[in-house]
Image (cartoon, rainbow, N blue to C red):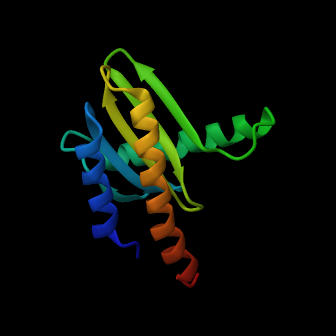
Amino acid sequence: MLPEAEVQAELQGLRARIPHLTGSLVATIDGLVVAHDASALEAESVAALTAAALGVGSRLTEATGQGAFRELITRGERGYTATYAAGAYTVLTLLAGSQANVGRLHLEARRAGARIAALADADLDRTPL
């Protein structure tokens, strides 16, 4: 089992460091929720959609010769949805308003993703199948 309290602390830290961040979610690559920090978010649905987007993003980067998936960002009328690889087993998805500084979003998400990856990979590498 992943250390949910530590992952949750990372998500809360992101909210404090990124202005206009409206939600965050960590999920396994197969779409199961690990932790989330968003009151209006249907976490299970977003986790499943994140897994689907991860699959498409991974295939696209490989098919175009760009290597392994690292991140995917979409921009809608009201803001951004960004998904970041967080190790071999988990992904970090962030929701931000249209006024968000995308550079700051990337910087903080990449750092948090690396910390979450260290937690998840260490834990899941030890978990017997």
The structure residue drawn at horizontal position 57% and vertical position 43%, both measured from the top left corner, is: 54
The spot of residue 102 in percent (x, y) is 42, 28
Q: Is residue 73 above or below residue 51?
A: above
The structure residue drawn at horizontal position 25% and vertical position 30%, both measured from the top left corner, is: 20
The structure residue drawn at horizontal position 42% and vertical position 53%, both measured from the top left corner, is: 112
The spot of residue 97 in percent (x, y) is 29, 25
Q: Is residue 97 above or below residue 65?
A: above
In-front residue for pair 3/59: 3
16 horizontally vs 104: left or right: left
Q: Is residue 80 above or below residue 110?
A: above
Q: Quadrant of the C terminus?
A: bottom right
89 horizontally vs 38: left or right: right
The spot of residue 116 in percent (x, y) is 44, 61
Q: Quadrant of the N terminus?
A: bottom left
The spot of residue 36 in percent (x, y) is 29, 52
Residue lying at the far top of the rendered structure: 77
User: Where, by quadrant of the figure, is residue 40 drawn?
Assistant: top left
